[in-house]
Amino acid sequence: MSARFRLAASTLAALLAASAPRAQEVRQLDRIPTPGPAMALPPGARAVATLRPVPPALVEAAVKRLAASWNTPALAARLAPNFYGRDQLLDTLQARVPRNAVLRVLGVQGVQTLEQYVQAEAAGQAVLVSRVSATVHTQVELNDPASGFQRLEGTNEIVLLVTEPAP
């Protein structure tokens, strides 16, 4: 074997080794929910000194009420006016989701109280308003005319405003 051939073969082998695909993993980057910048308080509200965790059972009940109103006209009243993509979500549900589709809550985890403040209600009573984050495992069930009964599972982070009587 000539030196020229060996040099060409070793150069080709080095190029192939350098361009060989490397084993890599692609993972979704999920942000860990943490208290963000201070929430703009409504007029007459005062921030609490220390956060009082909202009971997970209360959050779970609120999530179930939200799921029960999914795909119904009642959902519009449950979404905050500043909910990002609110109108698009409501339009999509009405135009593309079958009327018989149901959202089931399979589990609620990671309930975390992010921010709280005390505010006076219209009746004059003080209420504690908490911004709460929860990870919700859901399942959409529907009858598709072409595919039959479908179950579509998903995991979502939901941020709720929970109002309770002030302590």
Image (spheres, rainbow, N blue to C red):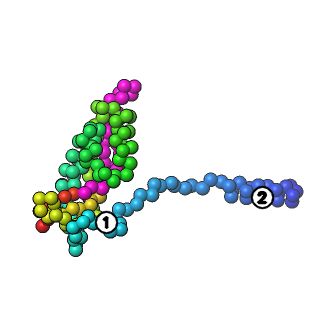
Tell me where residue 37 sits by quadrant.
bottom left
Residue 36 magenta-highlighted: no
Q: Amino acid at mark 2?
A: Thr
Residue 89 sits above or below residue 14 on the image: above
Mark 2 surroundings within 10 Å by alpha-carbon count, few (fewer than 14), some (14 through 19), many (20 or more): few
Query: In the image, residue 40 lies at what x, y percent?
Result: 31, 66
Q: Could you say whether the residue bearing mark 1 is in a helix, strand or loop?
A: loop
Q: Could you say whether the residue bearing mark 2 is in a helix, strand or loop?
A: helix
Question: At x 60% / y 56%, what residue is drawn?
Answer: 22
Q: What quarter of the picture does the C terminus occupy?
A: bottom left
Left or right, 7 with respect to 105, comes to right
Q: Nearer the viewer, residue 72 or 103?
A: 72
Query: In the image, residue 4 lies at what x, y percent?
Result: 87, 58
Question: At x 21% / y 67%, what residue is drawn?
Answer: 44
Magenta stretch in the rendered image = 137-161
Mark 2 or mark 1, earlier in chain? 2
Alpha carbon separation for disc pair 2 and 1: 61 Å
Query: In the image, residue 57 lies at what x, y percent?
Result: 18, 55
Q: Nearer the viewer, residue 21 or 13?
A: 21
Residue 105 sits above or below residue 18 on the image: above
Furthest residue in direction bottom, as rendered:
49
Tell me where residue 87 sits by quadrant.
top left
Left or right, 1 with respect to 92, comes to right
Which residue position is annotated with label 2?
11
Between label 2 and label 1, give the one nearer the viewer.
1
Left or right, 30 with respect to 16, comes to left
Q: Please identify the dominant SS of the magenta region.
A: strand
Which residue position is annotated with label 1?
39
